[in-house]
Image (spheres, rainbow, N blue to C red):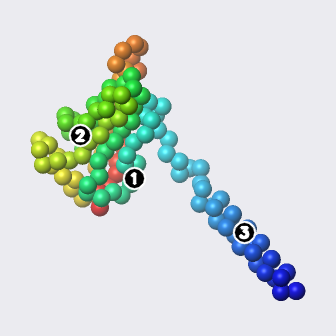
Amino acid sequence: MPYRLLYIGLGLLAVAAIAFGIALNRPGDELVLPEEIEALSPNPGDLVPPQTSVEVDLPVAYRADIYIDDWLVTDVVFVEGTGVYRWSPSPQNPTITEWAPGEHTVRVVWDTISGLPDPGEYEWSFRVG
């Protein structure tokens, strides 16, 4: 008899765990990016530490301009073989030497290097805590 209660309890626990997992996996929470952006960091709405860097991954055949809080970033590090752009504030930067606490906006404007033009842009915000 005690084994039945144990099995019923474990079964109810398993059902509760599955229901909890389904409740947390809401389809509306998925990040939908433009086709040209393969990845980015930080994600829209993220709360990040002050030492965070901005990273945008585009297909290899694309070039981009990156704007942080409406300032064109001129010292972005671009890895040509991967299409990854990376930037973080530094004391040598002429416009942004460090992240101020609060919300920051990133805008990426891209186009193809050769072939048919494929211009576009994407903008998102994150918070520095």
| Relative height, residue 125 to residue 24 (above, below) | above
Name the mark nearer the viewer: 1 or 3. 3
Q: Nearer the viewer, residue 122 or 76?
A: 76
Q: For the residue carrying disc 1, how many other residues have a C-alpha within 10 Å: few (<14), some (14-19), or many (20+)?
A: few
Q: Which residue is mark 1?
A: 45
Does dot 3 land on a helix, a strand or a loop? helix
**Considering depth in this image, is 122 or 88 the residue closer to the camera?**
88
Question: How many numbered marks have been drawn onto this rendered protein structure?
Answer: 3
For the question of whether residue 36 can be seen, the reply is yes
Image spot of residue 106 (x, y percent): 31, 42
Disc 2 crowd, CA 10 A, few/some/many (<14, 14-19, 20+): few
Residue 27: horizontal and vertical position, in percent?
59, 50
How far across and how far down the image is residue 29, in percent? 53, 51
Mark drawn on residue 14: 3
Look at 69% across and 63% down and name the residue there. 18
Front disc: 2 or 3: 3
User: Residue 60 location in percent, x, y?
Assistant: 39, 26
Q: CA distance from mark 1 to mark 3?
A: 33 Å
How far apart, in angstroms, are the residues tagged by discs 1 and 2?
Answer: 18 Å
Assign the N terminus to one quadrant of the image: bottom right
- Measure the C-alpha gap from mark 2 to mark 3: 50 Å
Q: Name which residue type carries label 2.
A: Asp
> Tag 1, which secondary structure?
loop
- The amino acid type found where label 3 is placed reads Ala
Name the N-terminal-most of marks 1 and 3: 3
Give the residue at the far top of this rendering.
Answer: 115
In depth, the one of 73 and 82 nearer the eye is 82
Residue at the (37%, 25%) spot, across then down: 62
Q: Which residue is mark 2?
A: 70
Quarter of the rendering occupied by the C terminus: bottom left
**30 left or right of 56?**
right
